[in-house]
Each structure stands twice: as C-alpha cells, then as structure tokens.
Image: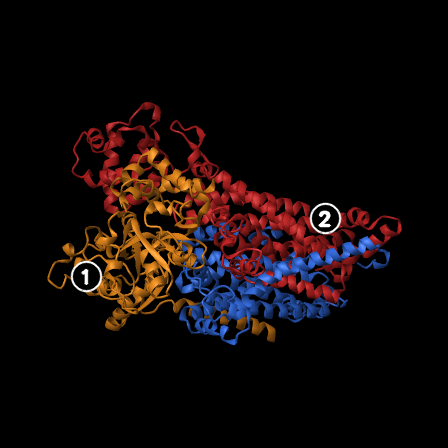
Chain colours: A red, B blue, C orange
Amino acid sequence: MRDVGSVGLDGVALKRALERSGRRRRMWSFLVVLPPLIFLLVAFVYPMGKVFTRGFYDSTVSEIIPETTALLSSWDVGEGLPSEEVYATLLRELVAAKKERTLGLLGTRLNFELSAALGVVKSTARRGAKMEAPYKESMIGLSERWGSLDIWVALKRVSENVSMKHFLASVDLEYDREGSIVLVPEEERVYVKILLRTLWMSLVVSFFTLLLGFPVAHLMATVKRKHANLLLILVLLPFWTSLLVRTTSWIVLLQRNGVVNDLLVWTGLLSDDQRLSMMFNMEGTLVAMVQILLPFAILPMYSVMRTIPPSYMKAARSLGASYGYAFLRVYVPCTIPGLAAGVLLVFILSTGYYITPALLGGDEGMMISNFIAFHMKKTLNWGFAAALACVVLLGVMVLYWLYDRLVGIEKLKLG
Amino acid sequence: MASGSYRTLSERMWGWIFLLFCGGVFLFLVMPLLVIVPLSFNAQPYFTFTSEMLRFDSEAFSFRWYEQFWLSDKWRSSLVNSFFIATVTAICASILGVLAALGLSRPEMPYRRLINAILISPLIVPIVVSAAGLFFFFAPLGLIGTFPGVIIAHTVLTLPFVVITVTATLVGFDKSLIRAGLMCGASPLRVFFQVTLPLILPGVLSGALFAFVISFDEVVVVLFVASVEQQTVPRQMWAGLREELSPIILAVATVLIGVSVVLLLMLEMLRRRSDRLRGVEET
Amino acid sequence: MLLMRRFLGVIFVLILGLSFGMTSAFSESLTVVSWGGSYTHSQEKAYHEPFTSETGIKVLSENYNGGLAEIKTQVETGTVTWDVVDVELSDALRGCDEGLLEPLDTLALPPAPDGTPASSDFMEEAITECAVGTIVWSTIYAYNEKSFPGAKPSTIADLFDTKKFPGKRGFRKGPKVTLEMALMADGVSPNQVYAVLSTEAGLKRAFAKLDSIRDDIVWWESGSQPPQLLADGEVAMSTAYNGRIFNAVVVEDQPFTIVWDGQIQDLDLWVIPRGGKNVEAAKRFVAFSTTTKALADQAKYIAYGPVRMSSIPQVGRHADSGVDMKPHMPTSPANTKNALFNDVFFWADFSEELNQRFASWLAK
C-alpha cells in the first residue's frame, strides 16, 4: 500500500487516478439514470417495437391450419387450382377448427382479403364431415368459390406469418393476384388522403399558433416581471386544464344552440333559423386545436424572448433603424430557436391528435389517430392498426430527430 | 416597449393595435374555460344560457348538477379512482424522474443526448400509438383492466414532464454543496436525503404536481388499457360526451378547472420558493 | 435518516394502496354491459333490480357502443371483467364463431306460462348457439316538429329529399343500415335490398343516393346522440333507435315524430364472454331476464318489442306516463308495412369490404 501523500508526486499515477475517478463518476451517473431508463425501455420502447412487429407478423392462421399452410407455401398461382391433397387437408383442418371454435378467427382474416369468404368457409366446415372424396369436386360442388383462384390466393396470403400487406394498405397499396404491388381500386382508397389531411391540419394549426403566439410571447417578454407572471398564469391555466374540459367548452361554444350562435342571434347578425353549423367539421376542429395547443407554442417562445436583452433593439434604433426594421432584422432572428421549438412541438403534437377530432370533427375533421383507434376498437384489425401507427410513428420520429438537431431536446421547457 | 420614448405616432398606434391583438388572444385562450363555469349552475338541462340566466333571475341558477355529481355512485367512485391512480403515478414518476434528472444534470453523463431523447419520447409519440403499444404489451401479461397496468402506463406518460421540470430546477444548483457534504464524511445516500433533496424539493414537488395533473386528466390510455373497475373521471366524461350530454359534465368540468387553479397557484408558490432556495434573485 | 425513513414509509403506503386497489376489484357482483341511456335504465328496472332482490347478487351496469373489441380483448388476455353483454345479432354470431362466447345451448330457459317450450316461444333468430335474445329494436328516422311546421315527412324517401325538407340529417356512422335506407329511399323494395346491395351496381346506386345529401349529414355513434342532436337543433331529422325517440317524446316531452316507413329491425341478445369468473351467476341472470314476464316488463320502460311470443299480449302501459306501449312497438302491424329485417349473414360476409368503402367514401 502506497502512502496517500505520494500520489500527488507521481504524474502518471495521478493521471490514472483521475481517469479511474472519472470512469467511476461516469458509471455512477449512469447507474443513477439506469432505473428510469430501464423502466422506459421495458414499458415504452419495447411496446413501440411490439407495434412494429404486430404490423407485419401474424401467425394466427398458420396455427389454425398448419398443414394447409405448409402445402400452400409451395403452391403458386401460376399452377392453377391446387391439388386434391390440398383440398382434403384444408377440409379436414376446417372441420377441426370448427370444433375448436377458431374457425371465426380464420374466417374474419380471410374476409379482410376477400369479401364473403367467411360465409364460404363456414358453410364448408359445417358440411365438411359429411363430404366424400374426391374432395376437390365436392367442395366446388358446395360452393363454386372453391373453383376460383381468388380464394386460394387469399388463403395463401393470410397463412403467411410475415407479410407487408398491412403496411402497403396503410398507403392504399395492395398485392394483386400475381403478387406485384398495385394501387387499391379508387373507391377503396382512404389512408393517403387521411395522412395528407393530418399533415395539412397540423400545418394550419402550427401556422396559427405561431401567428397568435408570437405577439403574446413578445408582450410577456417585454412587460414588467410582475405583469408577465400574471400573463403567464393566464397561459398556463388552459395548459393545466383537462383536454377533455377544453374540448367540452368548445362544444358548448360552437353548437347550433351554443354560445357563439346565441350571441350572433342576440346581436341581430343572424336570424334564429340561420344559425351556423360550426361543429362536426374541419374548421371547428382547427379552431379548438389552435386554442388547445397555443400554450405549447407560447411557452418556448417566451422563454427564449425573455433572454434577449432590450439593449439590442435600443442599439439598432440608436444606429438609425426604424422600429419595424430593427424588429425584423435584430429581434426576430434572436427568437428563431424558441420559434422553431414552439412550432415543431405544436406540429408534432397535432399530428397525433385524437380526442378533439373525435368529439368535434364529424367526418371532415377525422385525423389518422382516429382511424388507428377505429381499427383497434371497432374492426379489430389490430395488425392494420399497428401498421398505421407505425407510419405515424415513423413520421413523428423524423420530426423528433429534426427537433433534436435544430433545437435540442434538453431545451424543452414547460412553464 | 421599453423604448417608448423613441416611438413615433404611427409606432404608438401599432403599439395599441398590438396590445389589442394580444388581448384578443388572451381572451381566446381563457374565454372557453370561463364560459363553462356559469353554465354549470344552469337550472335547466341545457348546454346554453337561458334568457332567465341572462336576466340574473336567481331561479335560473342552481346547484343541482353538482348535487347529482356528488350523489352519483359512478362519478364518486371514478373520482376516487382518479385520485388513487394520479397519486400513485405522481409518486412513481417523481422517484424515477428525479433519478433521471439528477443523472442527466451531471456533466460526465455518457450518451446524454440519446438517453434524454428516450426519456422524453413518451411526450412526443402520439398518444393513440402509445396506447396501442401499451395494449399489445400488457395483453399477454394480464395487465389490461388492472390498476397496476393503468399506473405503469401513466408513469410512462408523465415521466417526461417530471424529467423536464426537475432538470429545469437543477440548472443553477450549486454542486459544491454536495461536495461539502461528502467531505464532511456523510455517505452519498445521506447527502442525497439531507442536502440535495431538500434543495431540489420544490422542483420535485412541481414535477409531481405535473404528473398528478396529467394522469388525472388522461383519457386515451385509460380507454385502451383500463376496464370499468378503473373508471376515471375523464373516462366517465368521455362516455358522457359521446352519450348523454348532461350538464353534470359541465359541473365536473368546473370542478376540474377549480382543481387546476389550485394546483397552478401551488406550483407558482413552489417556483418562487425554489428560486429563493437556489439563490436566483427575484426580479 | 428521518427523511429516509419517511421515504420508505411512502413506498410502503404505496404498495399497500396498490394491493388494496387490486383486491377491491373482487366482490360478489355481476357486471352487465349494455348500450347506456334510457335503454340501460329499462333493463335495470325490469331485470337487474328484481334479480338482485331475488338472488342477492348485485348487478353493476357498464355502457359500451357495441362491437366485440372489449370482449375480444378480455377473453384473449384472460382478464374477463364483463359477465353479461347485450349485443347485436351479428356480433353474437361472430363472437360465437371466434370462440369468444360461452355456449348457451344447454341453458334451460323456462317455458311460456301456457307451457309452450322456450324453443318455440322465442322468435326464430333469438336463440343461437351462444346467445339468448331479449328485444326486437328498430332503426327508424325521426324528425323535429319544430323544423317542419308545414308539410311533414312521411316516407323513407323524404329522409333523402333535402329539397322538399331542408335541414341537416343525422346518420349512424357506418355502412350498416345507412346503405339499406339509401336503397329503399331510391325505390328498392325491402325484400330486394340485400340482393341489390350484393351487386357492384347496387352498391354504387346506394352511395350515389348518399352523395346527393352528403353535405347535410351529421354522423352519430351512440344511441343517445340522435335525440340530443334533434333537441339541440343540430339536425332536422335523424335515424335513431326507436326506443330512444319514444323516451324523448314521452318522458322528456320533446316534439319528435317517428317515421316507420323503411324501418330496419334487428335483435339484441345476451351473451356471456368466455372464461369469466361468474359464469354460473351470469347464466342464472340470462335465464331470469328472459322469462315471459321479465321481457314484457321491460316494454313498460322502453318501446322495444319482446322476442317471446307469449310476452307480446302482456305488454302493457308505459310505467311513468301510462301510454299504451303496443302501437309503439317496432313489431306492431301498423309499423311494419315497409319494414326490413337486418340480414346478419350479408353483413358477416361483406362488412370488411363495405367498412373500407364507406371509410373511403367519407374521406372523399
């Protein structure tokens, strides 16, 4: 054991000791962060990965009809109808599935691919036990659908564990019979429109929050601290109030018998039967979203503007610039970090809006989140919901990365 | 505005327009909330002002919706559930969030940027996507429709808010105090509980309040992972808004606004206290 | 170390609270899930309350908006908290096929008072492998008298005629019922509707009819919304469940009128999600609430027709207002002149495709 005092004399030992202590401190810091980090990795990042895998992986059907799946994997549509062996195997497995009560699972998935396939499968399974060989003929005799290639292509497709079909469907694409990627028929196209609409609505909301938020943030940054605190509370109050409460208040305001219409009728601007429909459309949704997201734009802008010394403007003015010129060329450039932070945050948050469009949006104001919820809750097509969610997630991740690059996440402040 | 003496007449006029505009924006921000409050005292089952109300007829106002809110088992039990879930969430999120903020505020923290990005991500990911992911994650674990499930989900969602708030209070935190404590021979744990924690406590409490409010108001994740036993106030409101638009909802909304005001004032007090503790001068 | 001890104390309380929260979930009660509003109210009066007073088992009501999502989630994750659910016929069949529901074919249902066995006393569709029916309900359209002081709408075609009867229209958001009504309004007779709808040309025809009033449609999702929309003046007429409109008129004195022309009938049935903790009690509840008397009793509170033949003569007067309920039943002969019965097999086969096309049409 060396004497403690001698460490200081030895340069190499000191360097090593410093290094060691530095490493230990880094390790300590890391250990402190570990519990929350592990928690989020397990309870958030992993579930997000799960959304991703759900989007392309589904083994339900291959587990219900394993032998048919194996036979179909080596079958190709170019060969024409499958052999008698495939028909016999499928029939046996359908009858077994009916007994196991899993036939419906198979049938619904098949129906997503091909309409009315569910009915065919069900009636076949019901009468399957009494059917006789050759099964190919008797099945086609029962329903001529068994004699068409479509149902076999659909069966092959749903029995594949890994498939990109949900991701394709979320941008209005599908596989055709030969397996090449094509656009879905025009009357079934939805999601590209909805994605574009979501982007458009988010852009409009970001633009208006910027337009309304910038002057307010500027005012707050330039008045006395005491007044600024009061104004800050006015901004924070809606921010702290439940989203649902604020959406409710917009329903109260915008209804046909709502406060705004009442006011218009009372002032004589409208007669009683001319009341405006301001709810259940895109405009109403946008107005409510702007109000709800406005604090998210104001707060980052305010925190940046607060740090801009008033002397900058004074200097510009004393050098002969007009107020407007000084404002545009000196003040505004200084606010860019806050501005970018606010606008990007609002944009990111509005792409994922769900509650407000669901309550106020009617059909015009539906955004992509509403469709994810619809497929999660109503059609039970979870694979497709997951694929849609992935598309949104991907978009948001790009924006998040951009935000980190331009603004830096550590600069995010909330009041 | 500080440069008033430099301004010409037209500039002053612009100033007035500017103030008027800002006033309008503030009205736009706050008015929707204010409208609800008087309407919740409506004696009639409508969502709008009756002519009697505008004449300030005392019979047009009543507490009946508040009474119904309080007497209804459904609303009361959902209030209890909401408080329980939000409290436990706030505690869990604060513990995890303080650890995260402490670690991230150390200059020697490795991979800071990446870790920060992960910790903040629940704030950024659209809530429906998070809810779907948590649903897929919880389903095989049997956590759907249980209190721990909802609490874990809410802890995930509120953690970024705690991290952000506590990190902000750690800025300007005098680290020599920790070193002083260590040099006096205290164990690191003791230093944490007797030096660091009391100093950052206001920040931690504001983070906890934040987590509480967000969990208390959250509805989407509750819709995906909770069942009737975890019925919360927002979920009950959601059902009400989509089904029977009864003015009880306005009464509940008013109560929630009141809760927000109280919490906001508490937060403001905490902020001042924290500024004082950290030696940031009051301007 | 005081702080440290306090800190540990908080964690202890937290764990205690958690376990308390979890155990409080288990108690001696049945969770019965239905569609909310005046409909759930009628069930509480006719089924839940008598059941509790006879058996001592508490019944908790929960609302939902139809569909199998929640049941599927609960059954597949093994966390079944719903004991009995009121579902539409199509969901009863699909849920049974997917193995989500407890088979009820062995359930002994009591015979009618005159001894007719349950199997012939119930309507044909009302007893299925996994479900027992309770009511016949109907989607009709109703209008607000205030909106039409002059000529009154009287046929299904008037619902789609915004020239003759201007004003917004409420429709349930979804292809089911909406497409059928569009075709009937376009002149297709009820017995031809599903045959026409199965063809591409027929589908185009239905959507074209919807296109003609598209800008005037307000969509609703839960059964309590149409009376609300009509009362608020948000729409001038709306499709609705007939019982909800009846209650708005009789109980809340709203000036609404039902148009029975082109009504579309459907059944509601009890099902029991598979793997619940109270299956035996749930079965008892189902048998109890589908007796001749219980079914007739429900019709005292809401204008839905009982599915047992023997209940129909027992249908009396409305509990609060004393209105004779018989003429307000969807099955009353005066109301069924131009009526359609919802074809569940058609919807089982085509719902995915039509949902998709409907969504696409909405997004246009």
Q: Which mark is residue A336?
A: 2
Q: Nearer the viewer, residue B228 or A321?
A: A321
Look at the picture and state if B165 lies above or below A59: below
Query: To which quarter of the image does residue A266 belong?
Result: bottom right
- Residue B268 location in percent, x, y? 66, 68
Per the image, the residue denoted by label 1 is C311
Q: Is residue C89 left or right of residue C357?
A: left
Percent coordinates x, y for residue A351 in the rendering = 55, 47
| Mark 2 surroundings: few (<14), some (14-19) or many (≥20) residues within 10 A | some
| Relative height, residue A12 to residue C192 (above, below) | below
- Residue at 62% over, 48% down: A206
Three-letter amino acid code at the position of disc 2: Ile
**Label 1 SS:** helix
Tag 1: amino acid: Ser
In the rendered image, the vertical position of residue B220 relative to residue A198, given as above or below: below
Q: Position of residue B93 (x, y in %)?
A: 55, 62
Residue at 83% x, 55% y is B9
Seen from this angle, which residue lies furthest top? A79
Q: Which mark is residue A224?
A: none
